[in-house]
Image (cartoon, rainbow, N blue to C red):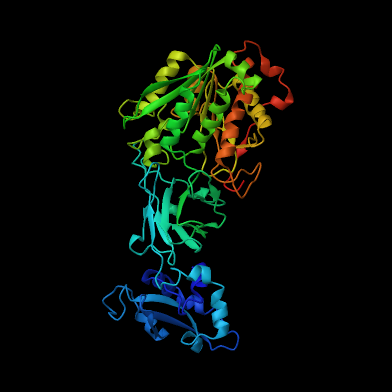
Amino acid sequence: RKQAWRFFAFLPHEGCVVTAASASIIISHARSCVRRLRPAGGLLAPLLAVVAGSATTRAFSLHPPARLGSFRLGSTADQSFSRREVVGVGLALGPSFLSPSSTFAAQSKKFESVLRMSGGSGGAVPVSVTAAFDAGNIECVNADDCTSALGIQVKIKDDPFTELEKKNHKQWFYFRAAGNFRGIKSQFSIVNAGGVSYPEAWPESTVVYSYDRKEWKRCRETTWTESSGHLTWSLTPEADVVWFAYFAPYSLEQHNDLVAMCASSPIAKVEELGKTLDGRAIDMVVAGSGPLKCWVIHRQHPGETQAEWFAEGLLQRLLAPASERDGLVSALLKQMTFYIVPNMCPDGSFRGHLRTNAIGTNLNREWGDTGDYKAPTLERSPEVYYTLQRMDREGCDAFVDVHGDETLPYNFISGMEGVKNWGPRLQGLQGLFTSSYARANSDMQVAKSYDPDAPNEANLAICSNQIAARFDCLAVTLEQPYKDCLTNPEPECGWSPARCKKLGASLLDAMAHTAPFLRSKDAFWDTLPKADAYVRPTEGTATG
């Protein structure tokens, strides 16, 4: 609101026009704003005024503050103002309002890029908002008055209702804004950001934007206001079409391109585990010929697009042509057979969901029964049903479930501490894997994570817990941030697709270091060097 007042402080001059809705915002807070203002430059005391007239003809009239008390846009109480008539509200500095002085004109010039809403045509620039495309999610709140002058107000749509958790998740957003607003500073607000699944995640978050949907940048002017529940950002677009998202999207078309790349590799084969509820393929890539079975699955939660960027980096290194393949990978392909699922939830991905599949099932709560709630089932969670069925057939010696975490500004491993078979062996394996990962890629760290489960208190409906207990193997959840990564801060780009891919490639270094011990019969944990020792993590926070 304070920002809005600064925006309109020099509004009432000839070239400035706004909409009725923006006028209403200013009016509702006018008195508190004007009390903080003082006369300046010899001009008369500030005068709050309503500007009415025609945006087309620029025939304006000044209505004094006395009218403000009963002023209600669109109401029958005051027919002299209609929604179409009111074109401005702002601060009039005495007589300068009607006949701008050079001083006033100079001051107004400072705000020209913001106030020139239509290149001098006299009307506010209309902005079209849509999310009607692969992975899109948004709804425009002020569709009838969506202008760069007022600000574009949107809200995130719910995922379908989740039967087990009794809630509608939401937080993922991805939309396109288009209009003749190139070079005009524009403000966007998600007005229901306070009602998302993880509102505590918004501090330090920055929206990403792109003009070509290939290069994604961070909007540094992103602010979270807890009192209003609004996530707001400002941008001066360099083009007339811009895309915004919570994180760089990974579309179903990109997924299909990734699968095609894998299918064309001479050392891999692509298999279909089954079909989703929407009839989409659940793709799995198989590579290697070794006796140890390593499973890596991604994107159980579809809005966690970091996970599939990670998968791309992992698969590009694993399946590199022989002339480009590094020795570590060549040796690992002889030690292990990899089963990689790049996208566990293609339906939710396409539909623009945060955490659920087509009918609202949170797949990472479907790996075992919860009381009378039976899982997985073909009717509710075929993605998990088919994957677990195949795992039982093939076996599993190492397992990684790749996710993104809304709140914590780190990459981290969430481990197996709460399973009943947790002991020196699994603790040693987790220490080996996590510490070697951090050495291979400094974007990984070992100190921060979720607070580990208490002994024997693991929820076996959660994927990595179920696999650790079911196969008595190394099984972990790997989380990546949406915001910047505090171990190596890069405010301009934050955590990015390129860094996701490098972290995915580095998984192979950690796996190579851990592989000799996965099914070792020796008490290897007694002789591990200090650098490989297990570190019990502490709970991280939204700001570190």
Q: Quadrant of residue 521?
A: top right
Name the side, left or right, on which 256 lies relative to 518: left
Q: Nearer the viewer, residue 191 or 153?
A: 153
Q: Residue lying farthest right? A: 530
Considering depth in this image, is 534 or 295 the residue closer to the camera? 295
- Tell me residue 458's x, y (percent): 50, 28
- Please state the total of marks drawn on the protein image: 0
| Residue drawn at (28%, 74%) of the image | 75
Q: In this view, does 193 lie above or below 527?
A: below
Residue placed furthest toward the left = 76
Q: Is residue 320 above or below residue 247?
A: above
Is residue 350 visible from the viewing direction of this image? yes
Residue 16, quarter of picture: bottom left
Q: Residue at x 47, y 50 (%)?
A: 244
In the rendered image of this protein, does residue 390 appear above or below residue 32? Answer: above
Residue 403 seen by the camera: no
78 relative to 369 in the view: left or right:
left
Tell which of 397 and 253 is nearer to you: 253
Residue 336: image x %, image y %? Answer: 56, 15
Left or right of 269: which side holds 332?
right
Q: Can you give x and y, in whole percent of width and height, for residue 285 in the image?
A: 47, 22
As drawn, is 497 to the left or to the right of 125?
right
Q: What x and y, as percent, mark residue 249?
A: 47, 42
